[in-house]
Image (cartoon, rainbow, N blue to C red):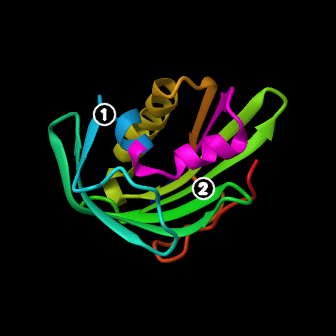
Amino acid sequence: MSAELIVTAHYNHSPDALFERASNFGDLIEATRKISTYSGLDAVPMEEGKTYTTDVKVFGILKSAGYRIMVNRLCSNTRLMESYENGDAINLWWHRLQIKPTDTGSMWIDHVIIDAGLKTPFISRYAKYMYQHRHKSRQGTDIKAVLRRPYRHVEVARPNFYPAE
C-alpha cells in the first residue's frame, strides 16, 4: 500500500535563491522545529550521492531512530532534488523537490511517494500536514496539497515518478 502526495507553494523569491535554501538541511530543521526534531542532522547543504542518518522525533513523542536520507539527485541548474528515505516505520519515502520560476517569483513543488505498509494512511496524512506546515513556516502562499493513491503500482525498490507539474 502506498500514497502519493503533491504539495505546491508560491514564494516571492528567485528560483535559484529558493533552491539554495531548499537544498540545505538547515531550512528543513528550521521549518519543522515546532513539530519535529532531527537529532544528529547538521544544518548543512545537501550533497548528491550522500546518505544522512538522523533520529526523527515528531511532536516530541513519536521517534524514528536511524532514519536514512539518501540524496540521489541534486541539480542546481534544473533546481531539482530527489531523495530516497526510510526508517523504522517507513519502507519508502521518495521525495522529489523542484523549484520553478513564475512571474512573481517561484513555485516550490514537493512530490512524495510513501509506503509504510499498514501505517501508510496515518503517515501520509501526517506528511500532508507536515509539508503544509513547512510552507506556512517559510511564508509560502497559495499552498495546495493533494493526497491520493498512486496511479501505478509503486515498489519499494523503484518508485515511479510522474513529470513535474
Task: Give the side of residue 6 with respect to residue 113, left or right.
Answer: right
User: Hey, what amino acid is under mark 1?
Assistant: Arg
- Give the residue at the far right of this rendering: 103
Q: Are marks 2 and 1 in contact (CB under 8 Å)?
A: no
Residue drawn at the location 85% of the way across and 30% of the way down: 103
* Front residue of 17 and 57: 17
User: Can you give x and y, in whole percent of width and height, for residue 133 in the image?
Assistant: 44, 29
Q: CA distance from mark 2 to mark 1?
A: 30 Å
Task: Give the side of residue 137 with respect to residue 74, left or right.
Answer: left
User: Can you give x and y, in whole percent of width and height, for residue 164 in the image?
Assistant: 73, 53
Q: Which residue is mark 2?
A: 150
Of the residues under marks 2 and 1, which one precedes in the sequence? 1
Q: How dense is the environment of label 1, judged by Cα within 10 Å: few (below 14), some, or many (20 and up)?
A: some
Indicate whether 28 appears above or below 120: above
User: Hey, what amino acid is under mark 2?
Assistant: Pro
Please state, as top left, top right, bottom left or bottom right, where the N terminus lies in the image. Answer: bottom left
Is residue 15 visible to the viewer in this orientation of the structure? yes
User: What are the residue bounds of the magenta stretch?
Assistant: 5-26
Is residue 109 visible to the viewer in this orientation of the structure? no
Give the SS element for disc 1.
Answer: loop
Residue drawn at the location 25% of the way across and 58% of the way down: 54
* Front residue of 148 and 139: 139
Q: Nearer the viewer, mark 2 or mark 1?
A: 1
> Which dot marks residue 159?
none
User: Can you give x and y, in whole percent of width and height, for residue 47 in the image?
Assistant: 48, 67
Q: Image quadrant of residue 153?
A: bottom right
User: Can you give x and y, in whole percent of width and height, for residue 60 in the image?
Assistant: 16, 36
Residue drawn at the location 27% of the way across and 58% of the way down: 89
Q: Which residue is mark 1?
A: 33
Give the SS element for disc 2.
Answer: loop
Is-magenta flag for residue 12? yes
